[in-house]
Amino acid sequence: MSAPQLVVHRDKELMAQAAAARLITRVVDAQAARGYASVVLTGGRNGNGLLAALAGAPAREAIDWSRLDLWWGDERFLPEGDPERNVTQAREALLDSVPLDPSRVHAMPASDGPFGNDADAAAASYAEELAAAAGPEDHGPVPTFDVLMLGVGPDTHVASLFPELPAVRETERTVVGVHGAPKPPPTRVSLTLPAIRAAREVWLLAAGEDKAEAAEIALSGAGEIQAPAAGAYGRSRTLWLMDAAAASRLPRALYPPASP
């Protein structure tokens, strides 16, 4: 478990640009060290804002996009191409404009895919895909992701792990179907906390005044069942990337400057 580090930017635009630059550095470093990199994407306004900033960054050319594996932390269980699906939004923000290897883009199944409307079967299939990608150097049934990004919801949810719901209590499975989510759509597929914690680095993205209370709760010692964001951490590093509005309820002592 790594203790959280906080990096606070003046506004969400600067946060997105700085996070994009940080991600480029991490991917390039991983590719230099091992020949490839593995990143877990998140949806929502902050996740998509980061991807849009990455699309506009000249330094994106430093990445060998053909040697990048992309996964998702969660997905809305909707038909393929639905504008509300995280993968649809990611393609629009960035993915369709860079030369990715399609076989290394691991989208979660859609509700009109081979599993129909069975979100639990879709989750089990994604867990199998993760397990197949894990190597002997990894720490279990998922790859050791270089960076796993998560948006933080106003209720402290991350991925589709909502407070008190069964998915946040899962300790064995790496991917689960989520039913009855309090945020539409109610049916989703999500990584679990054990899968999230396999990542080398976990980045939690929080921007806007509506995230201030969630950040305060998650960083004040709350339990992960009541505040799922509190249970999201990386093996070597946990970063909260925030704007000033989201950090407005935190004591300044909590966020000394973090190294790049």
Image: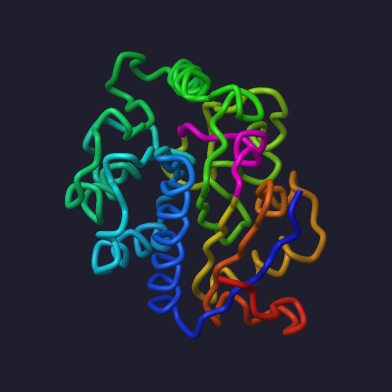
Disc tally is 0
Q: Residue at horizontal 42%, vertical 17%? A: 118
Q: Residue at horizontal 45%, vertical 74%? A: 15
| Relative depth, front residue between 139 and 173 | 139
| Residue 258, horizontal then vertical, whole percent | 64, 74
| Relative depth, front residue between 94 and 27 | 27
Residue 62 colored magenta?
no
| Relative depth, front residue between 170 and 52 | 52
Quarter where residue 217 is shown:
bottom right
Question: In the figure, is residue 58 to the left or right of 1?
Answer: left
Q: Which residue lies most toward the front here?
A: 33
| Residue 182, horizontal then vertical, whole percent | 54, 45
Quarter where residue 115 is shown:
top left
Residue 191 colored magenta?
yes
Quarter where residue 136 is shown:
top right
| Relative depth, front residue between 200 and 222 | 200
Q: Residue at horizontal 74%, vertical 54%? A: 2
Q: Residue at horizontal 72%, vertical 84%? A: 252
Q: Is residue 175 above or below residue 41?
A: above
| Residue 253, horizontal then vertical, whole percent | 77, 82
- What colouring does the structure picture have? rainbow
Q: Is residue 31 above or below residue 52?
A: above
Question: In the figure, is residue 22 to the left or right of 172?
Answer: left
The span shown in magenta is 187-200
| Residue 123, horizontal then vertical, whole percent | 48, 23
| Viewport quadrant of the C terminus | bottom right
Q: Is residue 153 above or below residue 197?
A: below
